[in-house]
Amino acid sequence: MIHKANSSLYDCIIIGYGPTGATLANLLGLCGLKVMVLEREAQAYHLPRAVHFDDETMRVFQTVGIAEELSKKIRVNIGMRFVDPEGTLLLDWPRPQEIGPHGWYASYRFHQPDLEHILRKALGRYENVETRSNSEVFSVKDQDDNSIVYFKDLTTGKKDSVNTKYVVGCDGARSFLRYCMETEMENLGFNERWLVIDALLKKPMPELGDHTVQFCNPKRPATYCRSPGDRRRWEIKLQDHEDENEITNLENVWELLKTWITSNDAEIERKAVYTFSSSIAKKWKLGRLLLAGDAAHLTPPFMGQGMCAGIRDVANLAWKIALCSKDAKDDSLLHSYQSERSPHVKAYIETAIHLGGLINRADNTKALKAALPNQDGSARMKSIAPKIGESLKAGSSEHRGKLFPQLRLSDSRLMDDASGYSPVLLIKEDINSYNLNLPTGLIVISSESEKEVTACLQNMGTDAVLIRPDRYILGTAKTKEELNDLLSFPMPSPLHRK
């Protein structure tokens, strides 16, 4: 028996309570939406999974108010090196050791259970966000004006349902919502089995180094990761004939690790075989159903961008859901979600595939093509920063779709702390001189009192820039007419400001 759908209409139901789903719930909580999170498992997974995130991701964590607490649990990453079987450096990817243009370090190492604990604790601030563990979604009915999500309490066996304006599947690579949407995955060509081993050192081993190291060996490619504290990770490619059950036998695991450590040096916390693959869902939205994170795309781990991509998804999506939920008859803004995010994440996936070719020593040319050559014959990698896909159009297009840096204001606050998860207009002079009809409550920062705003606008060659809640540029303007056009875009009063 299924209980009648809850007559209380939710703005959004989120399926999945990992980092992507929990971040989306926090962002929607900030926006004041009524949200329910449904998670099949009883509690957060206690072992490591994702181990890296970048400065853009940290800006999102800053927005939801967890950056300070999270900073105590993470480690600044110094970079990645690719070496051949003789130890010769093939590719160097140094990560800056100073605060970058986005207000944070470029690269971090973390322990995923720490992040999930902090994200879930942060949701306690919102009376408008409800979470239900041990709740398995078994059906979704999409309708013109709302959707119904059916789920089962795995503790009691009770079946229930709830009405909602939107449903977002953050339910991973085997996404049930993606199955309901009947969308196929576009295979981008990478599919390999790797053994992932997480270890806890019993004693200091500085000889292992603090860099991530990619051992580019066609016989046995491997990765070493320096994680926070005593945690270390190795990822080792399996050969086609190797059996997954046999290779994860503890004796065989230590045999694979003997180049680096023995059982006297560390204890194994986790050992599991994963298939590293590359694919993107062909449909990210169907009616009121949407996909995010691994449900929408999968990438090999060689750039450390898997979780980052999911966090970018929900930063892009949350403000659009917040605006569309206020006008249930028009959700055209949500059609921009896939067109913006899909080409952006594809650029990261393709770069990760090229790096995977280098690690396998199978495709050096593509892997090194975008790198910067060094005098010693090796190469140096740099982070990519693609634009989001062309979709929402307002103002001048020259800078549209680029991630905007996080400025330090004259009162020492970072710009994102001043604006919150909201649009912000940076303008060359006093806004009153333009005699504009501003959207109610729009956050405006003028160059008259902010030197960094002056310098930024000069470098961009513009007089005004409108920044979206996800920190990407909506458009720029040099004249009053262009500015009026820019401000006509439907991005009204702030969604959240601290």
Image: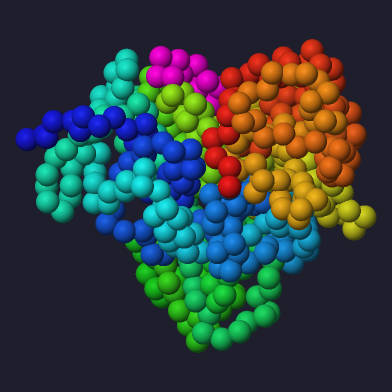
Range drawn in magenta: 327-338
Please give the name of the residue rendered at 12% of the width and 44% of the height, measured from the top-left corner. 158
Closer to us: 114 or 464: 464
**Measured from the top left, where is residue 29 in percent x and y?**
44, 43
Q: Residue at x 63, y 82 (%)?
A: 205
User: Does residue 185 appear in the picture of this structure?
Assistant: no
Q: Is residue 306 left or right of residue 162?
A: right
Name the one closer to the observer, 100 or 8: 8
> Does the magenta-highlighted stretch encompass residue 244?
no
Kindly identify the residue that appears in the image at 65 percent across and 75 percent down: 208
Q: Residue furthest right?
A: 375
Residue 433 placement (x, y as % from top left): 83, 23
Quadrant containing the N terminus in the rendered view: top left
Task: Give left or right: position of 238 versus 179.
Answer: right
**Observer-nearest of 321 and 241:** 321
Q: Position of residue 152 (x, y in %)?
A: 18, 42
